Amino acid sequence: MAILARNLFKIFLLAGLFLLSIRYIYSALLFLPAWNERYSFVVSEFLGFHDIEFFDAVFGLSASLIMAIIEYLLLRRFWRRYWPKRHPTP
């Protein structure tokens, strides 16, 4: 039962980090400068996206997912370093 609770906690932590990254990272990507639109059109046409808004959505969500995974891995690494200092073994 404890393993199930840990796995559910990890899933909810990653989902929460993903939602936070959508809120703060994806919204920052929506308001790019006007000069950047030209590059967005060129890249989207090169990759085969004919709708620039769909390309922006795919790019923004994939960037948010990558950031959420990086944040999750860093949190796990920091927790592994912090936990032994807090609870020393006898």
Image (cartoon, rainbow, N blue to C red):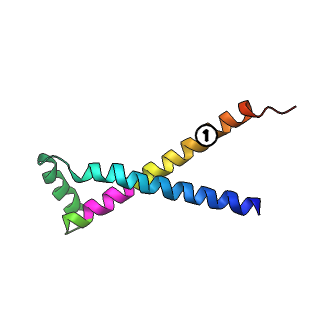
Apparent side of residue 88 relative to residue 65 in the rendered image (left or right): right
Q: Residue at x 55, y 41 (%)?
A: 74
Give the residue type that dot 1 points to. Answer: Arg
Q: Quadrant of residue 22?
A: bottom left
Looking at the image, which residue sits at the far bottom? 50
Task: Give the answer, above or below, for where 30 lies relative to 82.
Answer: below
Is the stretch drawn in magenta largely helix, strand or loop?
helix
Q: What residue is drawn where x is 61% and y is 56%?
A: 10
Rendered view: 77 above or below 5: above
Image side of residue 82 versus residue 27, left or right: right
Q: Residue 52 sits in which quadrant?
A: bottom left
Q: Residue 32, image x and y in percent? A: 19, 48
Residue 61 among those drawn in magenta: yes
Residue ID at (36%, 53%): 23
| Residue on which the image places disc 1 | 77
Residue located 63% across and 61% down the image: 8
- Give the SS element for disc 1: helix
What segment is highlighted magenta in the picture?
Answer: 55-62
The quarter of the rendered structure image containing the N terminus is bottom right
**Residue 31 magenta-drawn?**
no
Q: Position of residue 71 (x, y in %)?
A: 50, 45
